[in-house]
Image (cartoon, rainbow, N blue to C red):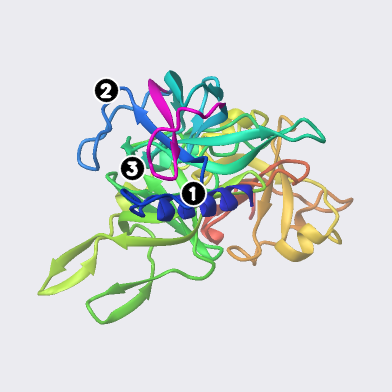
């Protein structure tokens, strides 16, 4: 909610700042906003030529000028401002004093920047009752600068130290492009997209809220097939209990010409082999690298669970256990409903079986006993090792 409010204030500022008042006596007096300029040697880049974006941040300096309503420097102004980013984060000192209308050579360390961003300067004043600093609504923004385009590995691999390792780009709308991407699964009201040639942090869930459809053969509409290549995709990054999603995505498939018609380009050979995660089930940092990817756990059995629990009734969710005692949840309701987990419980008189379970790796930070959930794509992903 705070991010949405900030964006609204920023939009209003841009609209107001576009008005011309030169030569007209201003109706208002005092501070109108700020001019924010980068150091002369700072390369803004462009959509065609993007600047480097090191992991430890882009360091440069800015000059801040207080402006009156006539858009001229307000040298009588003295106050405090917060220096932040429109999308990213300023890791340098953020509270700056403006003296006689100016603050020069202010260092900024810009982290978590993708595609394009701006430095934002906001006036703050101390609240008389609680001594807390609050923004006044007076602000200024730098020119836009362009860094690397968004990729799946950047969104998934740049995380902040909170439960579930959330993406540093949570709540930001981004466009994935300039990488080869392939659909690895279409389940649960969306699809899973993989960045070809990347081992860690390589996949993300595109939450379309319903079965995704695409055009094929000019006038034919079909559901998005596994193996389809995607040229670009846009959506808003969202953390759902630790699981990174891109919500309400739009996407552009890759097409090829065949017999005078366009057809989807499908290449299932680009779908990676499932990663065996049996040895890292208790290491959340390592598991995070494979979130939304194809994984497998071998030689597991169904552990005891309460079939009256809502998680099983609503989602057919139950625990799998390895021979070493590590566990992961499985969820079969929508994709493998014929698997009877209750019959596999280690009850007296039951003959339990051992399985290789393959599927998409999800995360839900409130799940127990494991925050990690394995969702098979279909019944073929469940291999019984000792069934007759």
Q: Which residues are magenta?
A: 58-78
Q: Is residue 314 above or below residue 267?
A: below
Q: Secondary structure at mark 1?
A: helix
Q: Which residue is mark 1?
A: 10
Q: Position of residue 312 (x, y in %)?
A: 77, 60
- Is 374 colored magenta in this rendering? no
Q: Name the element at disc 2.
A: loop
Q: Residues within 10 Å of mark 2 (few under 14, many from 20)?
A: few
Residue at image coords 21%, 36%: 49
Which of the 4 image quadrants contains residue 15? Answer: bottom left
Whole-percent x, y for residue 220 in the image:
29, 80
Cα gap from disc 2 to disc 3, whole angstroms? 39 Å
Which is nearer the N-term, disc 2 or disc 3? 2
Q: Residue furthest left?
A: 260
The residue that disc 2 covers is: 40
Q: Which mark is residue 196?
A: 3
Figure quadrant of the C terminus: bottom right
């Amino acid at each position: 909610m705070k991010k949405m409010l900030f964006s609204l204030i920023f939009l209003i500022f841009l609209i107001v700042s576009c008005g011309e008042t030169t030569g007209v006596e201003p109706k208002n007096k005092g501070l109108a906003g700020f001019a924010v300029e980068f150091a002369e040697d700072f390369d803004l880049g462009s959509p065609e030529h993007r600047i480097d974006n090191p992991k430890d941040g882009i360091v440069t300096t800015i000059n801040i000028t207080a402006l009156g309503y006539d858009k001229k420097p307000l040298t009588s102004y003295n106050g405090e401002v917060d220096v932040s980013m429109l999308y990213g984060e300023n890791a340098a000192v953020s509270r700056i004093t403006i003296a006689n209308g100016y603050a020069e050579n202010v260092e900024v360390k810009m982290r978590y920047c993708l595609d394009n961003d701006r430095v934002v300067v906001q006036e703050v004043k101390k609240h008389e009752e609680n001594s807390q600093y609050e923004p006044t609504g007076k602000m200024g923004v730098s020119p836009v600068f362009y860094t690397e385009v968004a990729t799946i590995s950047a969104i998934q691999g740049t995380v902040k130290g909170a439960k579930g390792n959330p993406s540093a780009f949570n709540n930001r709308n981004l466009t994935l492009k300039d990488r080869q991407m392939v659909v690895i699964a279409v389940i649960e009201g969306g699809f899973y997209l993989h960045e070809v040639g990347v081992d860690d942090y390589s996949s993300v869930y595109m939450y379309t809220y319903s079965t995704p459809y695409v055009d094929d053969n000019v006038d034919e509409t079909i559901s998005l097939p596994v193996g389809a290549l995607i040229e670009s995709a846009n959506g808003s990054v969202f953390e759902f209990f630790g699981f990174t999603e891109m919500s309400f995505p739009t996407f552009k498939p890759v097409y090829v010409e065949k017999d005078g018609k366009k057809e989807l380009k499908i290449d299932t050979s680009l779908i990676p082999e499932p990663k065996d995660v049996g040895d890292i089930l208790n290491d959340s940092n390592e598991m995070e690298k494979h979130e939304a990817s194809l994984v497998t756990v071998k030689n597991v059995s169904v552990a005891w669970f309460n079939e009256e629990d809502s998680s099983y009734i609503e989602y057919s969710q139950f625990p799998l256990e390895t021979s070493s005692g590590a566990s992961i949840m499985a969820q079969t309701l929508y994709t493998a409903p014929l698997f009877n987990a209750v019959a596999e419980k280690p009850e007296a008189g039951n003959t339990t079986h051992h399985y290789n379970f393959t599927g998409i790796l999800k995360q839900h930070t409130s799940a127990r006993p494991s925050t990690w959930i394995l969702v098979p794509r279909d019944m073929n992903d469940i291999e019984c090792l000792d069934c007759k």
